[in-house]
Amino acid sequence: MKKRLFTASVLATSMLWLAAAPTAAIAQDKFPSKSVRWIVPYAAGGGSDFLARTIGQAWGGQAHQPIVVDNRPGGNTAIGASETARAAADGYTVLSADNGTLIFNPVLYKSLSYNPGKDLTPITLMGRFPMILVAGPAEKAKTAKEFIAAAKASADGVNYGSAGAGSPHHLAMELLKSEAGLKLAHAPYRGAAPALADVAGGQIPVMMVDLAAGAGFIKGGKVRPLAVANATRLPQLPDVPTFAELGLPGVQAAALVGMVAPAKTPATIVAALNKQVVAAINEPAVKQKLVDFGVEPVGNTPEQFQTLIQSESTRWQKLIKDLNITLD
């Protein structure tokens, strides 16, 4: 009798498991069944917006559902992040999240309206925007070595611009300052474009800029690329050395842009989002558009993205704390 009851129990458990497995598959297959809201925490026209719209168009075509990009700028991405954190955890609201959203903000602000570790779950790293040290006519140095030597020897320090306090551009320059022992003074701007315009116009000597924002200025000869903060030389700038080649292997920086969803989004929906967005990134036409724009396409797993967030948090949060950089 006991043996029969045990056998019946095992069979019942097996049937429940088998019933659940197709349900998970069906959830993935039927998602999305309506439009998806994609929050971009920046104004239209920038790199993050381009990334979302390019990938979103391909994703929507594959999924046969509209992917609606909703620009919610402000608060160094906190406004968009908070709105995503409060959204229903059903996969129909996602967020473009960068270094600021996931890594910098928790230590730049004493009080933050969201907790990236508790309120958001990673889907995939969509792309990297490598950082480049560029100089304008106000900077006499023709090479990165010359610039580093001049910045070390300067009595008053060298001014540099950035896309804003707490931006990847700002912190990339602070990383160089720390690693090379330079004397630098920060002049924050409201975005990369006005900072670049002032570097090109000779109002400020140098800045770190991502390839996507700086490509036009570099190609037009308005600014000179001195070094790239990347592990390898960039295919778009094969003659520009890395900082590692100059004896500064720790100077590696990029604007990272990934996709996240509200924290309690079911695992099956996270898997569906990842599968579909990565497939869109890997479409040859999409990948080429991203490369041409200056983005290094990625498209990894949620686990790989989470591991990257953790390692980058360790590195950058220490720098921010050591330099006592705050935004409130």
Image: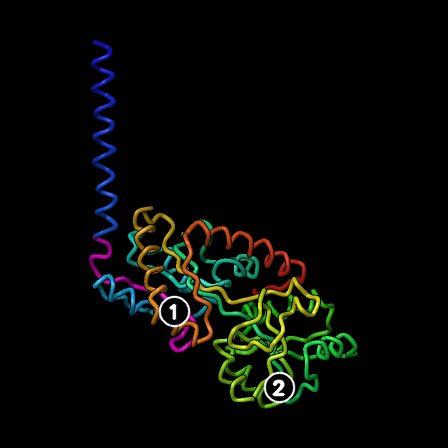
- Give left or right: position of 262 versus 3: right
**Do callouts 1 and 2 mark residues in contact (Cβ within 8 Å)?**
no
- Give left or right: position of 42 versus 272: right
Residue 3, placed above or below residue 250: above
**Picture residue at 48% right of the left edge, 58% below the top:** 102
**Picture residue at 55% right of the left edge, 73% below the top:** 164
Is residue 42 in the magenta section? yes
CA distance separating discs 1 and 2 = 31 Å
Judge the density around disc 2: few (<14), some (14-19), many (≥20) Cα neighbours within 10 Å. many
Nearer to me, 115 or 240:
240
Amino acid carrying label 1: it is Lys
Amino acid carrying label 2: it is Gly
- Give left or right: position of 31 versus 212: left
Q: Position of residue 86 (x, y in %)?
A: 35, 55
Nearer to me, 175 or 231:
231
Quarter holding residue 231: bottom right
Q: In the image, which residues are magenta?
A: 30-53
Q: Position of residue 209 (x, y in %)?
A: 55, 75
| Residue on which the image places disc 1 | 287
In the orientation shown, which residue stands out farthest toward the top?
1
Q: Which mark is residue 136?
A: 2
Q: Which mark is residue 38?
A: none
Q: Position of residue 100 (x, y in %)?
A: 50, 63
Q: Quadrant of the C terminus?
A: bottom right
Judge the density around disc 1: few (<14), some (14-19), many (≥20) Cα neighbours within 10 Å. some
Query: Element under label 2?
Result: loop
Residue 220, placed above or below residue 85: below
